[in-house]
Image (spheres, grey):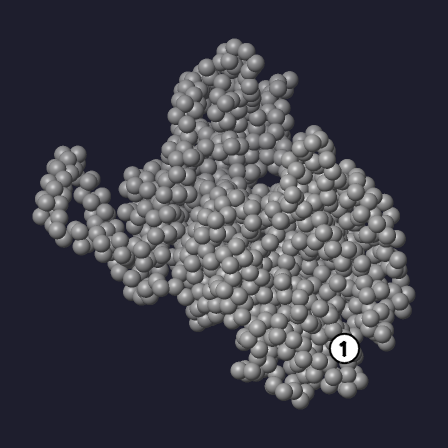
Amino acid sequence: MSGVKRRVSEINDLKTDAPSINKKALLDHIENTESENKLALESKDNNNTNGDDDSEEDAEEEQESKTTTATSSRGQNNGTAAQDIHIIRETAELFKSNIFKLQIDELLQQVKLKDSHILKVEKFLHMLHDLIHEVPEWEPKTIAEAESFFKGKVVRIPYVDPKPDPSTTNYKVDYKTPMISLVGSFALKAGIYQPQGSAIDVLLTMPEQLFEKKDFLNFRCLHKRSVYLAYFTHHLGILFKRRKMDEFLQLEYSYFNNDTLLPILKLSCKPQDSHISDYNFHKTKFSINLIIGFPYQIFDSKKLLPNRNCIRVASNEPNQSLPATPLYNFSILSSTTYETYLKYLHKTKKQTESFIQAATLGRLWLQQRGFSSKISHSGSLGGFGTFEFTVLMAALLNGGGNNGNKILLHGFSSYQLFKGVIKYLATMDLCGDGHLQFHSDNQSSSKYVEEGFQIPTLFDKTTKVNILSKMSVSSYEILKKCAQHTLEMLNDVVRDQFANVFLTNISKMDNFRYDLSYDVVLPNGGKTKPEELTNFTFGPTERIKFITLENFLVNKITNVLKFALGDRIHFVDVELVGKKNTFPISKRRANYGTGNLLNFDFVRIKLLVNPSESEKLVTRGPKHSEEPTPEAVHFKNFWGSKSSLRRFKDGSITHCCVWSTSSTEPVISSIVNFALHKHLSEGTRILNDRTKPLQSLLPLPNLPASSKTSVLNLNSFYNLKRSFDDLYRTIFELSLPLSVKSILPVGQAFRYTSLCQPVPFAYSNPDFFQDVVLEFETSPKWPDEIISLEKAKTAFLLKIDEQLQANNSYKTFFTRDESIPYNLDIILLNVLTPEGYGFKFRVLTERDEILYLRAISNAKKDLVPELERTYMKFTSKYVASVRHTRTLETLSHSIPYFSPVVRLFKRWLDAHLLLDHLNEELVELIALKPFVEFSPYSVPGSVENGFLKVLNFLSKWNWKEEPLVLDLVKPNQEPESSSSGEDAQSSEKMTLAQFKGIQTNFQNLRKTDPNGMHVQFFVASKIDPSGILYSNGIPLPIATRLTALSKVAVNLLQTHGFKKQTIDLLFTPALKDYDFVVHLKSPFPLKVSSGVLDSSEFKNLANDKLLNSFPSDTSSLSRRMDPTYQLVKYLNMKYKNSVIFFSHRYMAVNGGEKGDRNVITGLIKPYFKKPQKFKVNMDCNSKPVDEQTVELNKDAIFHEISAFCNELLVKFDID
């Protein structure tokens, strides 16, 4: 509390005595030093290849030189060490890297595979190797003979579609013993422990004599592989049965990386009740993928380039060229290169000491963001997993720049390697503007070529494989955005972002990661045929290009939504929910026997919204011209009847679509519905049972057309501001003894955060009167004593009142302010404007702060803490509130969704009876957290996303040990912005010195209050480094209940989903948790008089009921105000030692259909729940139990509360 004594100006500036650092020069020095060390390490690596003897001699010489150097320069080291320590202390970048290193070391140790698990599974692998050699070879057979062989057997041939026709197929299939090798992460010794289990890849390479030169055409080699896999599976099952291993071994077909062209055999173990076999590796959570590969260079790789066609189909037009088959070509070509890339990565691993550790960091980073090596063309984030990450890192170790210059060096640490790859992904375009070429045989350096193919491209010139072929453009865009965001976190020198980069799983719950999501159900579900869909032609040419109907459907939906939504979204992710990739060996494909044409249940569309563009009413297309351009034709064909021509203010005539807004649905929902119904099917159902129920909870103002206005519309707040501006000008024109210096608005409505929007003459609203701070010019004649000073302020307010009354436009009256403890002489001037709004003015002088600080310095020691709290309350009410309002008003303009999110959060708090116990400013700062400190997510782009992130933060916030430090500047999500803009913004950002100062304040607070008994929430920023201005004085039960409720809410959503039923539960108070509940009913319904639209009534009737003037007698205003507020305030004062009271603050919102219901609940403090030894100063209503002990007289207290409630009382429930 000692920090309270500092002057407000000192608190605002937060100046520290830390020396200024020339950071740029220092970082340049560090980079030069590091590069010299890396070159030395590289030179050492190259020298070590000469032989073991040379390396041993070098080691001995190095040891001798170290000893000599240590002896000769011991005196110099003392000075150098001191200088190094000084540099480390001053350089945030180095300090952060050292911290990162310790955290990385601990993380790598935790994810390391157990040696016992490795030995267990290796024992099985050795046995499996021997069994594979026991599989008998097979004579060449035709397809018809092969199918007849499997008739009556459990195993089916997992043909890829289309299935070969035995009558027209001439080639033979057979089985010869394969070459067996271990590939993947396990072979590279880069595997990590994963709770869901890991897979070990075993490659079975088919012999060359099984193929012909043209088998890469028309699925021939794939069908041969399918028969080969089925024959192998059949005999392997027999061998397992002979050894009685079928009791615990499970054999299934699976699609490797979700590629339907690549079926594999998956081995996993089931638990055994007794007689556990030595070969049962169930506890290791491993599974084994038996992959059937092709020999390296068995086919001409040039004929399998991504732009070549390898599937011949009949065409109606003789001169029509067939489209390229990139997915098919990649599937075949990649099946020949497993061992090639294993050797490539293994060689790089030997050259680079930290390669495996960096690969592990990359794996963790990708997994936490939902990326994998699975093909992304059939939905979800894929195409870039650990394999692609390590290949890219290996390529960058051998070049990667425009001129083939190395991006990474072999001597880099794991952190530097990881950051280098992330930076490359974030800053280089591998899709539209260029691509990266590398050589897996290391014959030449890697090089970035400024030629884009409009698909993600990492091209191996040796094997002719595009490593990123499995990646869609949408998936690449999301990956690049994640890399850009991660790079910002890694460059953050103020905060420790380790947990956000590696530990936080942002893919765990889509509602936290994405702003909006829609479930698209096709007309007949999985049985939907292509011809049942509108504008949906899935003919032979589409089939050979996309291979499956699922791939084509995902591509179609993605392209439609990208064009329809344009810059309203950052990106779209399409997921096929219910898709099966593993199926029994008795089936040919995953959906075989189900009657479904499609291998999924429904489509889930997930959008990351651009908040600044999402609610615009017009979708602008190309300009109109006499000769229709291809863009204009496409625009009109896409939108159909929705397209129209409009003239804009600049005189241009443009094709466009106009949309309508709604208070319950975003504009994006209307566009998604229209576009998918037009381009997919009219019978398509688009479900979203989250957005509408949640946005409906925001109270609508009782104003014309309010139900058709967007949640981002702030017109009602602007109307109040215009009314205030008129009053502002009027007061400045008054003739007063002292000139008015400033009129500073500090009310909630001025920062757009009041739960109920301002409505004229709605004086039943608890926030109707907005606070304003009035300052006069400096004068030495102000009294030098607090009470006299307040009376002088009142005299000035009387003068203002007198002149405003003479104006006849304004109504005024005075009220007493009790917000500052022990100062009951504060008088407020309440002004009612002709437009129907209310403001209450308080006066601030330059003497106030001096007098409060003087009172603290002159007080007795036992009174100082209470006076410090009084001074803190004064500061928050008069000084800090001005900065808070100004800052949040500015941020609200740049963060559109902050206003509706904080209003919804206030409704949730009030629904659970907590809002009255929390300062409005504290609530607003907590709600601001996901907007300004949003890592590792993005800035919320919808009401539901922002609200969920607030709850998620509260559920995880350990406020005993962690301060909430907010950098109240506009969030920067555009890495491509100009450097001048970045410099301007970074100058406003919180510095390391300021951040450290705030952390010191928190540590000092916790030294005096380690368990948070007196101050729980420490919420600090540059404008309030003390962190306790708005959180001081909150009872501990309120803080713990807020945390508990948020945990229950998040757990409810994760367990039962985010839907209307769970949303209703979220906003239902748990009244059974309280010791007693008093049900009240107001004599007057307050909904309409509070300016809240009653959804159950017709709009014209609600508007007729709305008041259009103030009563002539201003004293009658209180008759239509909620009496519960003053009643609870009195009860908390009377029983403050024994009971904590709760109630709804906004009866019009949470008080039933008419807004006339409320409850008062109470929690008896734990100390009084059992008998206590009698004390004279107990200060509570007690009754004797025996001669020495007493207990709380609950019956008397309950009767007193009932008497206070009088005719408001409906029911009194006692737990």
Q: Position of residue 304 (x, y in %)?
A: 47, 45
Answer with left or right where residue 188 lies relative to residue 49: right
Between 1028 and 834, the residue placed more toward the observer is 1028
Question: Is 980 located above or below residue 948 in the figure?
Answer: below
Where is residue 230 shown, x and y percent of the image? 55, 25
Mark 1 element type? strand
Q: Quadrant of residue 932?
A: bottom right
Q: Quadrant of the C terminus?
A: top right
One can see residue 443 in this view: no
Image position of 1005 (left or right of 162): left
Name the residue nearer the viewer: 315 or 5. Answer: 5
- Within 10 angstroms of label 1, few (less than 14), some, or many (20 or more) residues? some
Q: Residue at x 55, y 75 (%)?
A: 784
Which residue appears at 49% of the width and 45% of the height? 1010
Frontmost residue, 609 versus 103: 103
Image height of 1110 relative to 1071, above or below: below
List the residue tagged with mark 1. Answer: 812
Q: Is residue 1141 visible?
A: yes
Which amino acid type is shown beneath numbered disc 1? Answer: Thr
Q: Which quadrant of the figure has residue 1098?
A: bottom right
Give whichever of 165, 950 is nearer the camera. 950
Q: Residue at x 20, y 40 (%)?
A: 49
Residue drawn at the location 77% of the way across and 55% of the way down: 1127
Instruction: Check the image and report above or below for 297 versus 409.
Output: above
Say above or below: 866 vs 600.
below
Horizontal and vertical percent position of residue 398: 31, 50
Q: Report whether 811 appears left or right of 772.
A: right
* Numbered label tally: 1
